[in-house]
Structure formats: C-alpha cells, structure tokens
Image (spheres, helix red, strand yellow):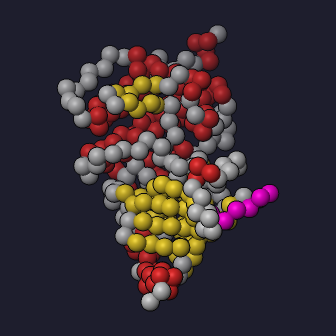
C-alpha cells in the first residue's frame, strides 16, 4: 500500500472512534504548519495571529467544551461528524476544523485562517492529562470564570472574585501536575500577571502584565485594582516549603495568596474612597 493511501485509511479508520477519544484529556497546541510547504509557526505571519501557542481544547462528554483560541477563552458546544469538528461558542461564533490525523496523543486539525490574506494551516496538538471532576478541573468553565471579560464596571467584591478564581485555577493546574506526576509544566495556557521561576513565583511589573489579562477587566482602573490585590498579597510574609520540587513551591505560594485575597476584603484593594 502506498504511504498516501495508508494515511487516508488511517484517518477513515480513526474518525469513527475519534469522538470519545477526544474527551478525558486536554489538547495543547504545540506547532503550526502549512499543509503544502510544511513551514513551521516561526515562519508564518502571526498578525492577525493564526493561533497562539498557549491555545488548548478541553472536550467534555456532555458535548460542552472550553478552549483558548487566539488568546481568548471560549466555551460552548462541540460536535464531531466524521472528520469535521464544529465548535459553537457562547456568543454564537462557530469554529470549523477538519481532522487531518489522529494518532494516540497527537491530533492535527486543518483550518483556513485570516480574512484579508487567508492561509491554510495545520494545527498540531498533543494530549495531556486532566482531572475528571469538573470542580477540580483547571480547564472547566467554573474555574475559568475570571477569563470572561467584564461588560461593565465591577465593584471590589467582583474584582476580588476574579482574582480568587484565577488563583484557584492556577492552583488546580499545579495540583494536577503533582497528582499526575508530570515532569514538565507549561504556563502559557492561562493568561496571568504571575511569573513562574525555577525556585518560586513573583508578580510581574505592571508594565509587563499581558494585555490579555488587562482586557479581562472593564477598564484599566479595574485592572489596576486587581493588580493591587495581588501585590498586597505578595507583600505578606510567606513561608515556603523546604523542597527542591518547584511544583510544591508554586502550590504553597498560590495557597497563601488565595487565603490572603479571600480573607482581606477591606484593605487588600485601594478603593475609590481611600484614594480621595
């Protein structure tokens, strides 16, 4: 059998059983290429972005999904019909992909991206472990409410809720890595003002906070108040565990930040009244 014939047969054989195999894992984007010339993401025009390398898909058995698509968190319903994958997001936006290949933990999707200069691209994803319990799943909707952009000015309570939800999401992500005994941790899936280092964690300078984080808030004033909450949390004395395992250090810092933000609802933010 010719190699191309084998490839086509592989797609046909796997498409009928692909749907249940998409669930129970998180699919992280690892490469972008062009179908014809095989150019990698390093040589592709990324403005507007074809896809951000922190992108992921999380498909659930009930037909719902969460995803990071071009730096934006999306959620909604998904369906697979043969080799056609369709995602309908919460705002009605529809994303259509063609399953090019699927083999064990590797998934390649085809999409035509761009408006003024459309380009055919293959998106290469790799599967990673997840926690089945949605309450403990870092990729579930309930643990990513902080990523839904605000549509109006928010009071301190809602800003604190965003910060806490973000910290919980990161904490669950670290806990998954510990439970699954992962050796490598990607910090690109979740937009954050937090910086992860080999021996600890810090708050990025305000000038280096990603625009994707700032844009989650109604305006720069609300974003600054959220930043202040994290800054004040870091100002508290922290006790770090005596371990060389960075995951346990991250977990300890996030737990202490979460408690600080959760309990101190009066002084952790600089409220408009205190500015006057």
170 in magenta: no
Q: Which residue lies most toward the bottom here?
A: 1
Q: Residue at x 61, y 28 (%)?
A: 222
Res. 122 image quadrant: bottom right
Measuring from the top left, give residue 78's x and y in whole percent. 54, 69
Q: Above or below — where is 148 with respect to 245?
A: below
Measuring from the top left, give residue 168's x and y in whole percent. 39, 40
Q: Which residue lies most toward the right here?
A: 116
Report whether 226 appears left or right of 92.
Answer: left
Report whether 73 appears left or right of 28.
Answer: right
Determine if residue 120 is in view.
yes
Determine if residue 262 is in view.
no
Q: Above or below — where is 152 with respect to 76?
A: above
* Quarter containing the N terminus: bottom left
Residue interval drawn in magenta: 115-121
Report whether 228 appears left or right of 260.
Answer: right
* Quarter containing the C terminus: top right
Res. 212 image quadrant: top right
Q: Residue at x 62, y 35 (%)?
A: 211
Q: Residue at x 46, y 64 (%)?
A: 59
Measuring from the top left, give residue 166's x and y in whole percent. 46, 38
Res. 23 image quadrant: bottom left
Q: Nearer the viewer, residue 78 or 27?
A: 27
């Amino acid at each position: 059998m010719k190699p191309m014939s084998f490839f086509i047969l592989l797609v046909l054989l796997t498409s009928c059983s692909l749907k249940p195999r998409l669930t129970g894992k998180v699919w992280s984007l690892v490469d972008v290429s062009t179908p014809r010339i095989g150019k990698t993401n390093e040589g592709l025009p990324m403005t507007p972005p074809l896809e951000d390398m922190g992108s992921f898909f999380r498909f659930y058995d009930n037909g719902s999904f969460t995803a990071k698509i071009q730096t934006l968190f999306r959620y909604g319903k998904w369906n697979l019909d043969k080799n056609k994958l369709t995602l309908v997001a919460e705002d009605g936006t529809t994303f259509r992909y063609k399953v090019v290949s699927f083999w064990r933990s590797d998934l390649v999707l085809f999409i035509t991206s761009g408006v003024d200069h459309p380009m055919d691209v293959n998106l290469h994803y790799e599967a990673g472990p997840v926690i089945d319990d949605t309450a403990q799943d870092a990729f579930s909707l309930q643990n990513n409410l902080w990523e839904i952009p605000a549509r109006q000015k928010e009071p301190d309570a809602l800003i604190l809720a965003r910060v806490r939800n973000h910290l919980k999401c990161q904490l669950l992500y670290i806990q998954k890595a510990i439970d699954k005994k992962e050796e490598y941790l990607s910090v690109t899936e979740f937009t954050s003002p937090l910086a992860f280092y080999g021996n600890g964690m810090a708050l990025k300078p305000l000038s280096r906070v990603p625009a994707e984080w700032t844009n989650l808030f109604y305006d720069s004033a609300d974003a600054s108040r959220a930043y202040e909450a994290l800054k004040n949390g870091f100002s508290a004395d922290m006790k770090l565990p005596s371990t060389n395992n960075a995951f346990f250090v991250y977990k300890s810092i996030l737990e202490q930040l979460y408690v600080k933000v959760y309990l101190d609802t009066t002084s952790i933010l600089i409220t408009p009244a205190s500015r006057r």
